Image (tube, rainbow, N blue to C red):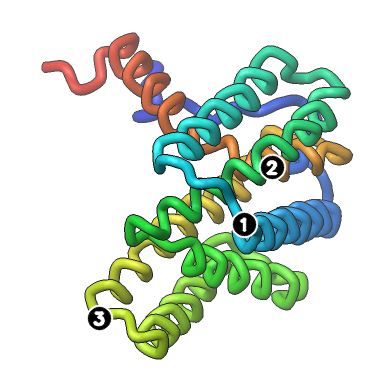
Amino acid sequence: MYVPPFVPQPTEIPGNVTTERYKVRLGFIRRVALCHFASAVLVAGLMRLPLPELSPEGPILSTFLVLLGMSALRTLARGNKWEPLASLALMPLLLPSLAASFVELGELGFPAWPLGVGLACALAYTLLCGRDLSFVGMFGTAWIASTAAIIVIGLLIGAAPMDAARYAVLNTAYLLYYVYDLGSLLSRRRLGEEAGAIVDLYRDIFNVLGYSIRSLRHWKRHSIWTK
């Protein structure tokens, strides 16, 4: 008797990175992580530039629309060799919009720097772990180091204890997303598609919604959760 899985299986493409030797997979992960961090540094630099006075909704809506367009491009062009580079070509639209969004969110009490601390700690683990990379270890190590650093930095800059705790919670949520997505995209990308993987770490926020819809359809199809 066939027993359906509780949730639908993740999307996999033939010849994905998970089919490669461990050393090759490790190299792919490090290249993607390093380039993604470089793009985050660029966003941080753009945040330092003078920006026009905008309502908070403007940059956030713009970022949402660019990410939505990137996701649509991947869906429509999945499997085409030019898709990763085409996706990367949209980054000049995304990064300034994302920088402006972070500035506006910072004004609302949700600064971006805790996310940068978490990402830096995750990158440090990725580069320094040798041949013993583990995504569980990446999250655990980065979370412990970044949480401690965020709380200390928050207190040093005069943030209230509750604000420092909120910063740590934001970092925890981001690290969970980043580490999970970095691991899961290995089954959706091939060698040579690092450019697309870098973009995926931004636009895969929509996968949360998409996977939720897939799960609901899966439960309905297989009568899961029904009496």
Q: Position of residue 123 (x, y in %)?
A: 67, 68
* Crowd tier of the residue under label 3, counting other residues whose Cα lies within 10 Å: few below 14, some 14–19, many 20 or above: few
Q: Is residue 69 left or right of residue 149?
A: right
The residue located at (74%, 32%) in the rendering is 90
Which residue is identified by label 1? 50
Nearest to the observer: residue 163 or residue 21: 163
Q: Position of residue 112 (x, y in %)?
A: 49, 61
Q: Closer to the camera: disc 2 or disc 1?
A: 1
Q: Which mark is residue 186?
A: 2
On the image, which quarter does residue 67 sit in? top right
* Crowd tier of the residue under label 1, counting other residues whose Cα lies within 10 Å: few below 14, some 14–19, many 20 or above: few
Nearest to the observer: residue 207 or residue 227: 207
Tell me which amino acid carries mark 3. Answer: Pro
The residue located at (88%, 39%) in the rendering is 192
Compare marks 3 and 1 and give the one earlier in the sequence.
1
Q: Closer to the camera: disc 2 or disc 3?
A: 3
The residue located at (69%, 42%) in the rendering is 186
Circle 2 sits in a helix, a strand or a loop, which is it? helix
Which residue is identified by label 3? 161
Q: Which mark is residue 191?
A: none
* Crowd tier of the residue under label 2, counting other residues whose Cα lies within 10 Å: few below 14, some 14–19, many 20 or above: many
The residue located at (72%, 19%) in the rendering is 78
